[in-house]
Image (tube, helix red, strand yellow):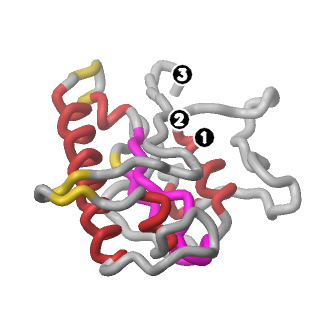
Amino acid sequence: DLHRRRHSFPTRRSSDLDGTRYRINGQTLPRYHQISHRIFGDYAVGDPIPDAAAKHHMIDREHGKLFAHLLARLSLYTTETGTLLDDTVAVWCNDLATGPTHGRNNLPWVCAGSCGGALRTGQYIDGNTTHNKFLNTILTAVGLTTPAGDPITNFGDPGLAPGLIDAMLTA
């Protein structure tokens, strides 16, 4: 549909060595990157941070509140076809599934909005796939195509299998 308007605006909450120190419930926490590694250090060396997993969960909850606030705000603006949230997709994710090991398995990606109906909503998909396929799917949903007009299927590392996550798309 050439008349469908889709919106995309990338944001980033942190850098690789996030030095952010959160203050939650009156408690100033150690640097976020260190909490993700569970040690007072940015790499593999440092003393353990007491209750690091609980501190990480506290920060995750704050990020969740910010994401909910974004969704509420996007829902306030109306467009010709619904709300701005209906016409776009907001994605909440983390760089890594497990901070200490920099793991990539079981990494959740939370998506809200349907990109004007291009994305299925209200479902859980166990993707068990590489990040590039997720990103290809989002690029396709926001309306980006190859010069030939085909869906983008080869974003990212050329050594990874190309493709889309079909279960996320309505067509």
Corner quadrant of residue 5: top left
Q: Is residue 89 above or below residue 108?
A: above
Magenta segment: 89-111
Q: Which mark is residue 139?
A: 1
Residue 8 located within the stretch drawn in magenta: no
Viewer-nearest residue: 88 or 45: 45
Residue under label 2, please give it: 142
Secondary structure predominantly adopted by residues drawn in magenta: loop
Type of the residue with mark 1: Leu
Per the image, label 1 sits on a secondary structure element best described as helix
The residue sitting at 39% across, 76% down in the picture is 49
Corner quadrant of residue 78: top left
Residue 94 located within the stretch drawn in magenta: yes
* Drawn side of residue 55 relative to residue 73, left or right: right
Residue ranking furthest to the right? 159
Count neighbours of disc 3 (C-alpha within 10 A) and say few if under 14, some if 14 to 19, many if 20 or more: few
Residue under label 3, please give it: 2
Q: Which mark is residue 50?
A: none
Q: Earlier in the sequence, mark 3 or mark 2?
A: 3
Type of the residue with mark 2: Val
In percent of width and height, residue 30 lies at: 36, 61
Does the CB distance between marks 2 and 1 fall below 8 Å?
yes
The residue sitting at 38% across, 70% down in the picture is 124
Per the image, label 2 sits on a secondary structure element best described as loop
Per the image, label 3 sits on a secondary structure element best described as loop
**CA distance for labels 3 and 2:** 12 Å
